């Protein structure tokens, strides 16, 4: 199943090494956001939606 890992680089709760580990387990890459923290969907819902569209191949509206 396709997966999108979108991670806030300055996140202090879930460190960046966790993103890499999760992405490897899921067989995908990481979309890094420099302007998002722990709650990435709240901080940058547009970037999360774009990453999901990229994974599923949906057109951008």
Image (cartoon, rainbow, N blue to C red):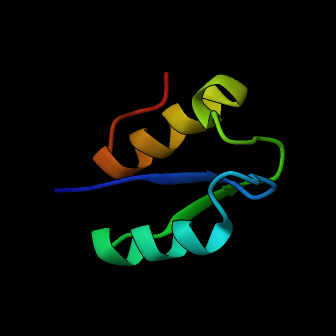
- Is the N terminus in the top left, top right, bottom left or bottom right quadrant? bottom left
Task: Name the residue rendered at 32%, 54% in the picture.
Answer: 3
Task: Name the residue rendered at 24%, 56% in the picture.
Answer: 2
From what the image shows, is residue 39 above or below residue 8?
above
Q: Nearer the viewer, residue 20 or 47?
A: 20
Task: Name the residue rendered at 50%, 45% in the picture.
Answer: 51
From what the image shows, is residue 61 above or below residue 1?
above
The residue lying furthest to the left in this view is 1
From what the image shows, is residue 56 above or below residue 43?
below
Taking the image as shown, residue 44 lies to the left or right of residue 30, namely: right
Residue 56: image location, x then y, percent: 29, 45
Residue 53: image location, x then y, percent: 41, 39
Residue 35: image location, x then y, percent: 83, 43
Q: Nearer the viewer, residue 51 or 15?
A: 15
What is the number of callouts on the image? Answer: 0
Taking the image as shown, residue 31 lies to the left or right of residue 5, namely: right
Residue 48: image location, x then y, percent: 55, 37
From what the image shows, is residue 13 above or below residue 40?
below
Corner quadrant of residue 25 = bottom left
Corner quadrant of residue 22 = bottom left
């Amino acid at each position: 199943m396709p997966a999108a890992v979108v991670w806030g680089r300055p996140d202090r709760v879930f460190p960046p090494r966790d993103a890499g580990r999760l992405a490897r387990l899921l067989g995908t890459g990481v979309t890094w956001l420099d302007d998002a923290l722990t709650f990435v969907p709240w901080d940058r819902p547009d970037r999360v939606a774009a990453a999901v569209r990229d994974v599923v191949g949906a057109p951008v509206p």
